[in-house]
Image (cartoon, rainbow, N blue to C red):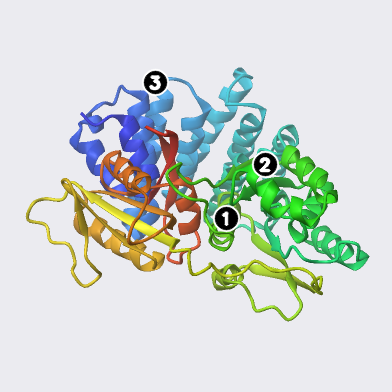
Amino acid sequence: MTTLHQILAIARAGNPARAWALFQSAGWDAHPDDRKALTLKGRLLKDQAKAASGADRARLYGEAAEAYAGAAALERDSYPLINAAALALLAGRPDRAHSLARETLALLDSDPEQGENAYWRAATRAEALLLLDDDTGARAALAEGISKLPRAWEDHAATLGQFAQILAEQGKDAAWLDRHRPPPSLYFSGIIGLDETNPAIAQNIDAIIAREKPGFGFGALAAGADILIAEALHRAGTELHIILPYPVDRFRQVSVAPYGDHWLSRFDTLVAAAARLDALTESPEEDERGIAVAVELADLVAMGQCIRNAAVLTSRPKALTITGRGDEPRRQHLVWTETGHEQFSLSVARKADHDPITAPSDRETRELAAILWVDGLDQDSQLPEAVGAFQTAGDACYRIAANIAETLSLSRSLLQHHADARISLLIDIMDPQRPASSLLEQAGDMARASGGGAILTDYKSAMVLTLEPGGHAIEEIGELQSVRGPLSLWSVA
């Protein structure tokens, strides 16, 4: 029987219809005495209601409310109770919402340990007061909760999204929520060969950061613009998320040390200060990747991290880049421009003796490409021929292409027509004619880990796919234990 955990994973992967079908076929809908089943039922019905309209929308919200209320009746818990209250309002039952909100307040008053932590206790109280039209009390309770855990950004964002929906249903202005929104996320990048002693560069960087007040910075730490921007962000209290195209020691050797010993200690300080540091690596069977393509992938991952972080926190992604005066824009900067998000650019003179990163050499046969791996197709299933040949690998097949957008579109089409197929999409640097065996193995492992209903991928690929237009649901769903160690597993639907 499909477990509740498996069903929840499919729902989180962005396929609520399949999750609901599995919930019903596994018989979980017939367990009114199971608190976890009722809570998941409420979640799944709520997901369906969001996609519905009119009478169906109100009905589904009402059924979701009663599922949560049933879970709360089995075990007095403020989480399902406040969800039931909010969903009753969305179902057009304000009296029921008021009754459940009062129950929530009574439970919070009788049990001071309710809720996951001090923030959620206060946020739950604020939501109950909001449902009872006590706007003043709701604002005070929310401000108190945020003051207790001021950097619980994801929790704050979830609350603000819920409050905005309630206020919209009540026909009230939600502008007051803006003062509590998490700060923007900033992708940063720039050239190496600049005159770091020019005070105007640092002043301009500081001015932009002071004005935009980013809470999170995403980029690399090459000598020059990267380090100058990262230092300014660190001074401003911004949380640094560093992504490097090579392992730390190798990146230090290639992109920091050659430009002067004075950069080394600054690099080391920022590495130590980073809230998160990711370094892209290749398998032992591969030669080292060329700097241009390695930097391209790292930049795309950093951009994706920035945009996803802003989306999760319901804030805004922005970019700051420093270019050489007269330089042609790099492909990565054009990618950011195509996302439509705000971008700030500083143009500075290059040092005369500096050689910029160049395009891959003629000897470099590797490029950024995607492996689409398909497993579990019925024998009679036909793969589309117009998009290029698939190669067989046992009972599976795969296709490699440099066009990531086309490959994503193809994978989604296959998923639509073959819901039970196990599909993975892996983006990395490879020779499309002779991909490393480790990449093919990883793509196959990810596909086999799928229960169907979603395209599975790894972390870096998920971040690159975040840049693709189309509003794809991209979610982390767990960890895959592979022969090369644990692999963060993500879904695309």
Q: CA distance from mark 2 to mark 3?
A: 28 Å
For the N terminus, the quadrant is: top left
Mark 1 lies on a secondary structure that is helix
Towards the viewer: 456 or 322: 322
Farthest front residue in view: 363
On the rendered structure, is 89 left or right of 492? right
Q: Which residue is mark 2?
A: 138
Where residue 438 appears, as percent x and y from the top left, is: 37, 44
For the residues bearing labels 1 and 3, Cβ distance under 8 angstroms: no
Q: Which residue is mark 1?
A: 298
Amino acid under label 1?
A: Ala
Q: Is residue 68 visible?
A: yes
Determine crowd level at label 2: few under 14, some 14-19, many 20+ residues with C-alpha closer than 10 A: many
Determine crowd level at label 3: few under 14, some 14-19, many 20+ residues with C-alpha closer than 10 A: few
Q: Earlier in the sequence, mark 1 or mark 2?
A: 2
Q: Which of the two discs, 1 and 3, sits closer to the camera?
A: 1
* Residue 74 vertical placement versus 163 (above, below): above
Amino acid under label 3?
A: Leu
Mark 3 lies on a secondary structure that is helix
* Residue 416 vertical placement versus 100 (above, below): below
Where residue 214 appears, as percent x and y from the top left, is: 74, 54
Q: Which residue is mark 3?
A: 74
Q: Which residue is at 28% across, 52% downward?
A: 373
Q: Which residue is at 36% across, 60% downward?
A: 53
* Quarter holding residue 386: bottom left
For the residues bearing labels 1 and 2, Cβ distance under 8 angstroms: no
For the residues bearing labels 2 and 3, Cβ distance under 8 angstroms: no
Q: Earlier in the sequence, mark 2 or mark 3?
A: 3
Q: Which of the two discs, 1 and 2, sits closer to the camera?
A: 1
